[in-house]
Image: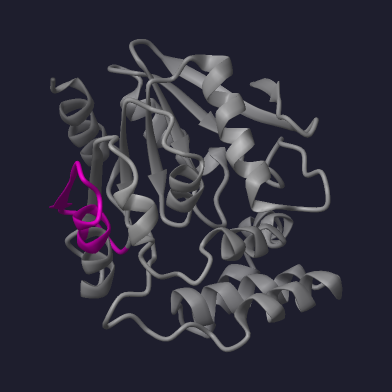
């Protein structure tokens, strides 16, 4: 593990594995770098993979008060420290990448949860309720709200997860669900933001994900001057490490 100090003094932890051009992985909601370790390993044959904990997660610090701009600064600090040329962002982490100004030669984005036509409605008072759970010292309530109402997992499944060792880790990250909610803004496709960047953008989706998630990727890359979209075999909201490694190796190596 290595650390870099972000602009506001917060320490951001990251692992580096592999050799080749640098590739930063940017996590979505409710995940830290441990979740992406298998992806980093699969990509390590072609890239120097930089797998970092977003602030408030894992071994990274969490200076308060939170502001969305601090995470853009964190990403830039990681990029500067490692010299990474490429980035791949997952789910809500896509908005961290986009709003940071895409300071990379090429980027890939995996299923940003933009609420396009056909998407389920956003949970009522979602951000406010998350913050209320956090303020009340009830991270489990925030975790359940996200998993059941935002993601759509059955409550019975969440109840089972509560009984496993992984639940403590989820509770430790639950306050960062507010951070992702703020990064997502109104969850609409950020057309003006995407249209203003010339960086090549590869949008990826799993063929097993709901149609609206696939459409969100397609609409996002359609708004980008240099965007392309690809679907690959996977599971819900996920491509396997092996599939992602093959796709990204071909994409970042081309040209």
The segment highlighted magenta reads 218-236
Residue placed most toward the observer, 106 or 246? 106
What count of labels does the image hold?
0
* Spot occupied by residue 177 in the image (x, y as percentages of width and height): 63, 63
Quadrant holding the C terminus: top left
What colour scheme has been applied to the protein in the rendered image?
one colour
Residue placed most toward the observer, 216 or 161? 216
* Spot occupied by residue 92 in the image (x, y as percentages of width and height): 47, 57
Instruction: Say above or below: 161 vs 156.
Output: above
Please say whether residue 160 is one of the residues in the magenta stretch.
no
* Spot occupied by residue 58 in the image (x, y as percentages of width and height): 68, 41
Quadrant holding the N terminus: top right
Residue drawn at 41 percent across, 29 percent down: 40
Residue at the farthest top position? 19
Residue drawn at 52 percent across, 23 percent down: 79
Residue drawn at 25 percent across, 74 percent down: 212
* Spot occupied by residue 183 in the image (x, y as percentages of width and height): 56, 58
Instruction: Say above or below: 247 vs 183.
Output: above
201 vs 174, left or right, is left
Residue drawn at 43 percent across, 50 percent down: 94
């Amino acid at each position: 593990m290595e650390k870099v100090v972000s602009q506001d003094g917060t320490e951001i932890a990251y692992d580096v594995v592999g050799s080749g051009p640098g590739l930063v992985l940017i996590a979505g909601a409710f995940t830290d770098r441990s979740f992406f370790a298998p992806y980093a390993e699969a990509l390590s044959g072609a890239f120097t993979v930089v797998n970092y904990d977003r602030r408030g997660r894992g071994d990274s610090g969490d200076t308060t008060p939170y502001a969305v701009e601090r995470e853009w600064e964190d990403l830039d600090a990681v990029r500067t420290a490692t010299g990474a040329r490429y980035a791949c962002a997952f789910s809500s982490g896509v908005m961290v990448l986009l709003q940071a100004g895409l300071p990379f030669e090429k980027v890939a984005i995996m299923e940003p949860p933009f609420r396009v036509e056909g998407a389920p409605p956003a949970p009522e008072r979602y951000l406010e309720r998350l913050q209320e759970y956090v303020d009340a010292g009830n991270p489990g309530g925030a975790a359940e709200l996200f998993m059941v109402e935002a993601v759509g997992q059955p409550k019975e499944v969440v109840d089972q997860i509560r009984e496993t060792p992984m639940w403590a880790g989820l509770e430790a990250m639950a306050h960062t669900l507010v951070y992702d909610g703020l990064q997502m803004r109104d969850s609409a496709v950020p057309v003006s933001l995407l249209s203003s960047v010339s960086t090549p953008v590869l949008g990826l989706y799993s063929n097993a994900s709901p149609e609206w998630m696939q459409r969100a990727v397609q609409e996002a890359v359609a708004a980008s001057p240099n965007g392309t979209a690809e679907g690959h075999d996977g599971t819900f909201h996920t491509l396997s490490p092996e599939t992602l490694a093959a796709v990204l190796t071909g994409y970042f190596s081309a040209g």
